[in-house]
Image (spheres, rainbow, N blue to C red):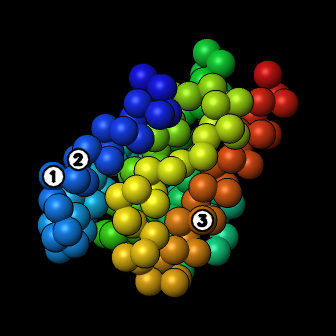
């Protein structure tokens, strides 16, 4: 599935809740619970995303020309946010990750409903995933 197709799927999911942000946050928390568990050896300080108020670990690896991301967080909303990003960008080609506009974040209204520190954390997650994509694309 392409990044755009996954983004559209997420937009449709969030539209089901209308303007009910309590339900949208619940959905985000549920997404976090479904995040594949990051292996303990990847939950190290060097895997922590800088700029996140919560602790967020991100691991990336190149497999068959695509990048696989695993992540975790110690905060439930943040874990949901990172689960969204992993869902959209994992198992994609580095170039597609680098080119991704990630418009779905605006379209579901997430940015405007996050505290400034969480919004900064989201930007830091995206930045780290794109940096990893750039680094891994030059490794292959």
Q: Measuring from the top left, give residue 55's x and y in whole percent.
A: 51, 72
Please rate how many residues cluster around mark 1, counting C-alpha atoms within 10 Å: few if below 14, some from 14 to 19, many from 20: few
The answer to whether the residues at label 1 and label 2 have Cβ atoms under 8 Å apart is: yes
Per the image, label 3 sits on a secondary structure element best described as helix
Q: Quadrant of the N terminus?
A: top left
Q: Is residue 81 visible?
A: yes
* Residue at the spot of label 2: 13
Residue 39 falls left or right of residue 108: right
Q: Which mark is residue 16?
A: 1
Q: Measuring from the top left, give residue 86's x and y in whole percent.
A: 46, 45
Per the image, label 1 sits on a secondary structure element best described as loop
Query: Which residue occupies 51% across, 50% down?
Result: 103
Q: Which of 2 and 128 is in front in this view?
A: 2
Q: Measuring from the top left, give residue 2's x and y in whole percent.
A: 48, 26
Q: Nearer the viewer, residue 34 or 106?
A: 106
Q: Which mark is residue 123?
A: 3
């Amino acid at each position: 599935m392409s990044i755009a197709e996954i983004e559209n799927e997420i937009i449709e999911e969030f539209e089901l809740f209308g303007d009910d942000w309590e339900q949208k946050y619940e959905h985000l928390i549920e997404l976090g619970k479904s995040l594949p568990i990051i292996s303990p050896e990847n939950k190290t300080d060097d895997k922590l995303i800088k700029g996140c108020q919560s602790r967020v670990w991100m691991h990336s690896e190149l497999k068959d020309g695509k990048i696989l991301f695993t992540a975790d967080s110690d905060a439930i909303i943040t874990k949901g946010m990172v689960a969204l990003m992993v869902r959209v960008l994992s198992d994609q080609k580095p170039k597609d990750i680098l080119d991704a506009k990630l418009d779905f974040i605006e379209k579901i209204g997430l940015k405007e409903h996050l505290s400034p520190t969480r919004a900064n954390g989201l930007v830091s997650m995206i930045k780290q995933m794109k940096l990893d994509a750039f680094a891994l694309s030059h490794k292959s």
